[in-house]
Image (cartoon, helix red, strand yellow):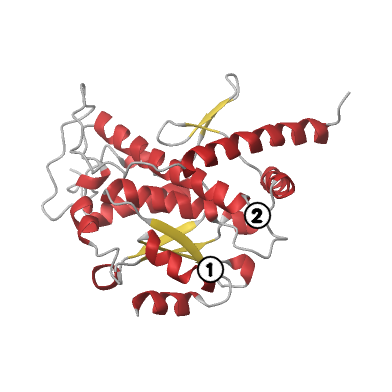
Amino acid sequence: MPTWNEVHYARAQEFTRLLADALAAASAPSPKPAAPTPPPVAAKPASAPAAPPAGPTAATVLGKIPWGKK
Amino acid sequence: MSPPDATPVPSPLDGLFDGRGFDHDAAAGTSTNPAGERVTFATPSFLRGLHHVLQAEKSGAWPATFKQCGVVTGRQVAVGLDAEFARRGQPALGALPLETSLLFIENYFASHGWGLLKLDLADAAEHGLVTAHLQHGYFAEAFGDAAEFVDPLLAGVIQGFFEHVSGVELGCDEIACVRRGAPECIFVVTAAERLATVAPLLGRATAAEIIARLKA
């Protein structure tokens, strides 16, 4: 009967293979993340929808940051 | 007659991160976080074992692997929060005020035991940099025998979260780590091509020096 360590080492090896596959897939050119979408409308909201925030939204502020500034 | 109630009006989102911790259903063999998501636990010994296996199978691959897993996780965390907000009739993360949106990722780290995260946008508007400071980080404790940067997974989570909310493709690297002798773990978020310019400094320069180079 395999020991506890042997069983878990085998499982970890399988997990490693899965991770390697995921990494290889992720290394392929990927589309840019989708732009933020308006909040989806809940079919049956548990409470009344919140009023839109008065100030700039997180997406607006983060979208204006000069991330690529040299 | 009781005095007027001065307590804040309860928010439908209070239950997400109110410190209740996780729920455990021993009969079903399941655990859920405050948002109702199914979770399980990775003990330090499990993480150390996984780290050792990854190193043995393909030396040097684990930071990139964990980083990519983190990016996917960060996006999924943000998507999951948006879905929960929608279910409660609330705005999505990107439609919330910035401070509120960032507070959710900080609270997500804390509520899941990853450590105390503090995001700093002081250099964002002028220099295009966001820094994140992590204290009591779980990986730094779990990998107590390592002398390397141990938080690529969390760097990926931060990156994925910011990409989701901003709609911009970004990068995030850990630039200081407790396991390398720093008092806290520090991450920087900016364009990936800018991070590539300071990659040779990682592990050789302090966080302040790396940030100064990015600002120059």
- Given the current orientation, which residue lies at the most extreme front position? A29
Q: What SS does tag 2 mark?
A: loop
* Circle 2 residue: B60
> Residue B126's image quarter?
bottom left
> Residue B40's image quarter?
top right
Q: Position of residue B213 (x, y in %)?
A: 41, 78
Asked whether, in this view, residue B144 is left or right of residue B73, the answer is right
Instruction: Tell me the distance, in whole angstroms, between the alpha carbons under discs 2 and 1.
Output: 23 Å
Q: Position of residue B88 (x, y in %)?
A: 25, 31
Q: Chain of mark 2?
A: B
Q: Chain of mark 1?
A: B
Residue, x 55% and y 58% (percent of image)?
B137
Residue type of the residue flagged with mark 1: Glu
Q: Position of residue A4 (x, y in %)?
A: 82, 32
* Circle 1 residue: B184
Q: Position of residue B133 (x, y in %)?
A: 45, 65
Asked if both marks, 2 and 1, belong to the same chain, the answer given is yes
